[in-house]
Image (tube, helix red, strand yellow):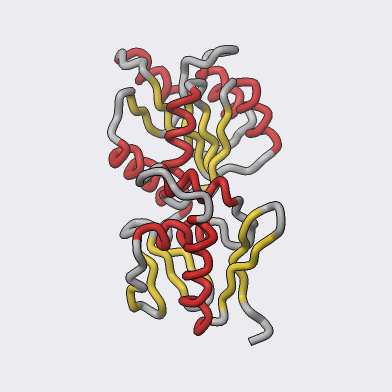
Amino acid sequence: MRILLVEDDAVLGDGLSLSLSDWGFDVTLAETGGYAGGALATQPYDLVILDLGLPDMDGRDVLRQLRARKSAVPVLILTARDGLNDRVGGLELGADDYMTKPFELRELEARVRALLRRSHGGFDHEIRFGGLTLNTRDQQISIDGVPLGLPPREYGVLEALLLQSGRVVSKDSIAQRLAAHSEELADNAIEVYVHRLRKRLEPLNINIRTVRGLGYLLEHNHDA
């Protein structure tokens, strides 16, 4: 599921991007209305999270342009504007939901998933790769239904790879994900966790390949 997050506050935007990625979504961050409009005109998205107070235009103009193109992509307005007229006006322009800042992450996740279920006729919380299954709602990885029981940091590494299965995941992005949930990492920590995970995944014919200069790729071991 691809989400376009339109938010000009760099700190909030980065934090929300990380949370949305942790929940299993592919996130694009747009800090201006112009960038958001261009992205929406050229790329398919499953949901838009839209701030109204953008530096170059009112977020309502982004919404107005989107609906003028007959796009039905769900839009969740996320803004500090909490007046009744703001809420009613946003919904009348075609927004599907409206949340005001500050907000709780758990409520945001619930609303995001509700909008996606409504627009896609159901939403699967599970990501599968061979015999591995990642349940993004329960934050659990299992093998054929049996929990793998990984230490937290090994879980974090494997979760990052599963969320981006089929793509190379950079070492820096993995480190940032782990550091967001615990203390600072040692320089060689990622290599240690990857080494341990490779041994665990050998019986499943799944490998973590090192792509030199880029990062790691989760792949099936076709030579086994």
Image quadrant holding the C terminus, namely bottom right
Q: Position of residue 38 (x, y in %)?
A: 68, 28
User: Which residue corresponds to the image point at 48% horizontal and 29% vertical from the top-left?
Assistant: 13
User: Which residue corresponds to the image point at 63% horizontal and 55% vertical from the top-left?
Assistant: 215
Q: How many marks?
A: 0
**Nearer-the-camera pick, 23 or 68:** 23
Q: Position of residue 57 (x, y in %)?
A: 57, 13
User: Which residue corresponds to the image point at 57% horizontal and 38% vertical from the top-left?
Assistant: 28
Vertical placement of residue 207 versus 43, above or below: below
| Relative side of 178 to 58, left or right | left
Q: Position of residue 60 (x, y in %)?
A: 51, 18
User: Which residue corresponds to the image point at 59% horizontal and 28% vertical from the top-left?
Assistant: 66
Vertical placement of residue 82 versus 108, above or below: above
Taking the image as drawn, is residue 89 in sight? yes
Taking the image as drawn, is residue 116 in sight? no
Q: Position of residue 41 (x, y in %)?
A: 68, 33
Residue at far bottom of view: 224
